[in-house]
Amino acid sequence: MKKVVTVIVSIVFLIFLVGCVNYKTQQDPQQDPEESRLLDEIAQIEQELQLGNTPAEVEKELPEAVETEVEEVVLPELTEEPVKNEEMQVIEVDENVMVKLTVKVHDPDQDSVEYSFTPPLNKLGQWKTNYGDAGEYVVTLTATDSKLTTEKQLKIVVNRVNVPPVVSGVADLHVKEGEVINFKPMVSDPNGDEVTVTVSAPLQENSWTTDHSSAGEYQVKVVASDGELQTEKTFTLLVDDVNELPVLTNLQDLVVKEGEVVTVKPEVTDLDGDEVKVSVSDPVGDGGVWKTGYTDHGEYLVTVTANDGKGVVTKKVSVVVEDVNMPPEIVEVKLAVN
């Protein structure tokens, strides 16, 4: 096939050289014999082509001199150029930023053009991003003159912007001893991250039952962390002292006989650790010991008082002294003087 193409191209080339001149009738007598021979052969080939000879026959009858002298022409290989895909435009923003896109549209016909965007943009190309919107969004911009429509895809890349957690519900507390304190701060994270919350003593368990020893002022720290950023808040917890009154024990009613000793020895405890002053009323007295006599029979109500300087506690003790009849006692015998 390649040889056939070479022959055909050679013929066309030679015909072009001789032009429209009748090479049979207008040969120059001085023409070179070799050139004359070539012209005759070309004329013969042309005649055979007109008679319907096939390219194979032409090739067979073509003199070797023509085949070797005609430069081989190689037809260029036709290849389809690859279609270049238009690179998608990328628009990059940070979280919590207002996206506003402006569009410049040209219409060769100067028609009125309307355009719109697909979500998350609104029709005008606006979108208020929030924390947590990080990601890639492909939107389509459509421009139309009501007859024809053009579309362009855009990629919106929203970069993550980490912000610390938000702690609320934290304020100073004022309670009294004996009260139960329940504390749990409200914590949120704008990025939707998992948050770890820690609270310092004495509210580390989020609940605390105060007692007689809890009075004082405490600085409580709340720390909320998302693993990268953290928020700290500190508040004051004030626990007022509530006085615990002294407790008197080891007191009971007594029954004794005249002549016996009455002993009142109260035991005192104070949960606050306050210094307590104890007093016992008469006839026993603060010493807590009373030696009864034979004329002391009767019933006595003894008051025991405990005072810690903040409060007073009293208890009553009944003391019964029973009468004991004693025989007369001869004290002295003297000679009477007349």
Image (spheres, rainbow, N blue to C red):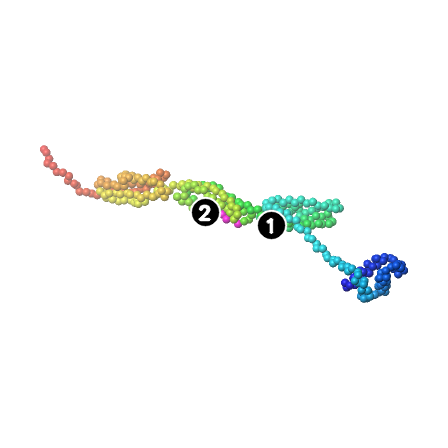
| For residue 297, side relative to residue 89 (left or right) | left
Of callouts 2 and 1, the N-terminal one: 1
| Disc 2 packing (10 Å; few <14; some 14–19; many ≥20) | some
User: What residue lies at 27% left-to-right and 41% top-to-bottom?
Assistant: 288
Q: Residue furthest right?
A: 25
As helix, strand or loop, the secondary structure at mark 2 comes to loop
Location of the N terminus by quadrant is bottom right
As helix, strand or loop, the secondary structure at mark 1 comes to strand
How far, Cα to Cα, is label 2 from label 1? 38 Å
Asked if residue 29 is positioned above or below residue 216 in the image, the reply reads: below
Foreground tag (2 vs 1): 1
Percent of width and height locating residue 228: 53, 47
Residue 120 visible in the snapshot: no
Location of residue 7 by image quarter: bottom right
Dot 2 corresponds to which residue?
A: 204
User: Magenta region: which residues?
Assistant: 194-201
- What amino acid type should be assigned to the residue bearing mark 2? Gln
| For residue 220, side relative to residue 144 (left or right) | left
Dot 1 corresponds to which residue?
A: 135
- What amino acid type should be assigned to the residue bearing mark 1? Gly
Q: Is residue 193 magenta?
A: no
Q: In front: 68, or 165? A: 68
Q: In front: 248, or 21? A: 21
Q: In front: 49, or 89? A: 49
